[in-house]
Amino acid sequence: VEEWSFHDLYDSEVEGALGLGLDSEAWDCHINHYYGYWWSELVEKGIDRYYSVLGWDEDKWDNGTSPAETEGMEWADMSE
């Protein structure tokens, strides 16, 4: 269920998430990490720039051609 964006959840799952205090923004950011979104939706939300910094682009994100180099890295292993 973590792979689904909030708008893809079943009604009972939405109820459960809301009961835990997780609205759509909290769910999509902290639980799903926006993986349930297409790149164009990241652009609409204005968060594509953060994923771009991490090495993602539309092809990698939407088509899974290859993950960004930062995928799976620990925070301490990343540089600015």
Image: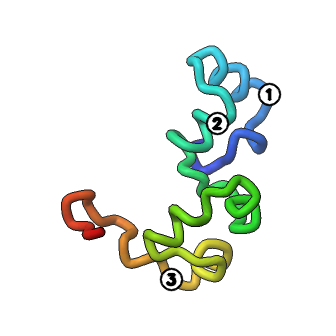
Q: To which quarter of the image does residue 49 belong?
A: bottom right
Secondary element at image label 2? helix
Residue neighbourhood size for the residue with mark 2, other residues' Cα within 10 Å, grouped as few (<14), some (14–19), many (≥20): few
Disc 3 and disc 2 in contact, CB within 8 angstroms? no
Quarter holding residue 8:
top right
Residue type pointed to by label 2? Glu
Nearer to us: label 2 or label 1: 2
Q: Which amino acid type is shown beneath numbered disc 3? A: Ser
Residue where numbered disc 1 is placed: 11
40 to the left or right of 52: right
The residue nearer to you, when weighing 68 against 16, is 68
38 relative to 48 in the view: left or right? right
Q: Quadrant of residue 62?
A: bottom right
Q: Which residue is mark 2?
A: 25
Q: Quadrant of the N terminus?
A: top right
Which residue occupies 80% across, 27% down? 11
The CA span between labels 3 and 2 is: 27 Å
Can you identify the residue that label 3 sits on?
66
Residue 77: give its label: none
Q: Position of residue 5 (x, y in %)?
A: 68, 46
- Separation of marks 2 and 1 at Cα, in angstroms: 17 Å
In the image, 26 versus 15, the foreground residue is 26
Image: 37 above or below 21: below
Residue at 58% x, 33% y is 26
Question: Looking at the image, what colour scheme do you see?
Answer: rainbow
Mark 3 or 2 closer to N-term? Answer: 2
Q: Residue at x 46, y 76 (%)?
A: 55
Q: Is residue 52 left or right of residue 40?
A: left
